[in-house]
Image: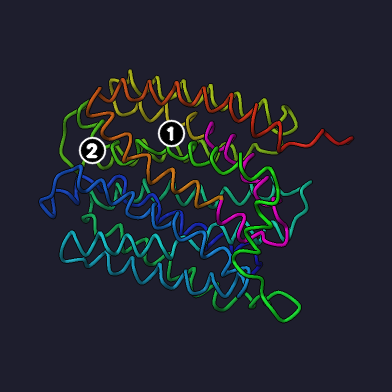
Amino acid sequence: MSMFLVLAACGFASSFSLRLIDPLILPIASHFAVAGSTAAMLSPAYALPYALSQPFLGPISDRLGHIRTMRVCMAGLALTLAIGAVAPTFQVLFVSRVAAGMFGGGLVPLVLAALGDAYDMAGRQVAIGRMLFALISGQMLGSLVAGFASGAAGWQSAFWISCVLAVIATILVWTALRDTATPAGGSAPSFRVLYARVFGNPKAKWLYPAVLIEGALFFGFFPYAGEVLLAIEPGSTREVARHAGFVLAAFGLGGLVYALTVRRLLHLMSVGRMCVIASVLGAAAFCVVALAGTWWQAALAMLPGGLAFYMMHNSLQTEATELAPTARGSAVALFASSLFLGQGAGPLLFGPMAHAVGHPAAYVVVAAALLALGQAVVRRVVVRLQPAPAAR
């Protein structure tokens, strides 16, 4: 089996687990008799450890080898998903999500780092765009399958499906890929040296804050999708879980549209223009959600919202792979850390804001912030990151 397919399997399993919990919030809250806001903390319980583990896992992979690190992380993710499926209490489930986030943190960044090793800058954004097909498919199906599985057989069945996918990926990465060697010269560089290489590039100080804010704005509402849909169209928790799965899957479908059209989009527009269009498109999507009267209207709005996110995110992601070629694992891991730190902090900010001013007003605030982010990315990030166009 090719290296690309094995990496895609690992990325798919990790992404599936990432978005697994969002449509399950209300069923889990009902099962364990906890408040919906308490159950919603299962989302940052995964995302924050995922983010905080990155600054350690990146340099570890640069020192010990990308494949070796991926093997341990993939096996750990499978184990923690199994524990979550049989959790007897909410506390055990919460701890299992924290552990799953820590192990999941070693997967997608290493997949991207491996692509950075294999492709030069000329073809890297397209290669990463194609890998996004697997990553986004995992996120989209994670939400969609979890919603349907919960409605059909209970929320635990969604965890078992994710566990099986992780076991398959674990077997593949342990059997189909060779260990990568530690750095030549006999002594692996220290964490300090590796991060000095990353921040020796002046691009870094603009890139990482931009992706953190991006993650908070686009993903802050995800754990509250069921709560919003319940207010729009009252129904059973199983019905709401299915509808929330559709809404969140539509966001992923927008990402698939990007993955399938990335080469043409790059041909039609500059990276700067792509980011501006992405901010406007994302702001419009959240405004439509604020006005939505049915779950399917919210789902339709989230499709261009997903396209907008990946238009902006992939542009920044590609540049992260080139910040420090001799510390690529560290650079990409810190990029993922920033994204998931934003994803973890987003619900902590969005929830109180939505409860204070109402969900529609909260979506409008997010839309305005996205417009501001788009302008900041173009003025402070893309201009500094993007080299002058080369002759073709």
Q: Please identify the residue farthest to the bottom as the structure is shown.
A: 186
Q: Residue furthest left?
A: 33
Question: Disc 2 marks which residue?
Answer: 240
Relative to 282, say whether 136 is above or below: below
State which region is magenta.
307-334
Q: Are marks 1 and 2 in contact (CB under 8 Å)?
A: no
Q: Residue at x 49, y 41 (%)?
A: 212
Dot 2: few (<14), some (14–19), or many (≥20) neighbours within 10 Å? many
How far apart are labels 1 and 2 at the CA level? 23 Å
Sequence-first disc among 1 and 2: 1
Quadrant location of the C terminus in the rendered image: top right
Q: Which mark is residue 113?
A: none
Measured from the top left, where is residue 71 in percent x and y?
52, 73
Q: Amino acid at mark 1?
A: Leu
On the picture, is 222 further left or further right than 112? left
**Can residue 102 be seen at all in this image of the molecule?**
yes
Image quarter of the N terminus: bottom right
Q: Is residue 389 above or below residue 191?
A: above
Residue 249 pos. (x, y %): 41, 41
Q: Residue at x 70, y 48 (%)?
A: 201
Rendered image quadrant of residue 112:
bottom right
User: Where residue 37 appears, x then y in whole percent?
Assistant: 20, 42
Most common secondary structure along the magenta stretch: helix
The residue lying toward the viewer, choosing from 87 and 95, is 95
Does residue 11 appear to the left or right of 301 in the view shown?
right
Residue at disc 2, secondary structure: helix
Residue 193 placement (x, y as % from top left): 65, 64
From the image, tell me which residue sits under label 1: 217
Q: Residues within 10 Å of mark 1 (few under 14, many from 20)?
A: many
Front of the two marks 1 and 2: 1
Q: Say if the magenta span includes residue 174.
A: no
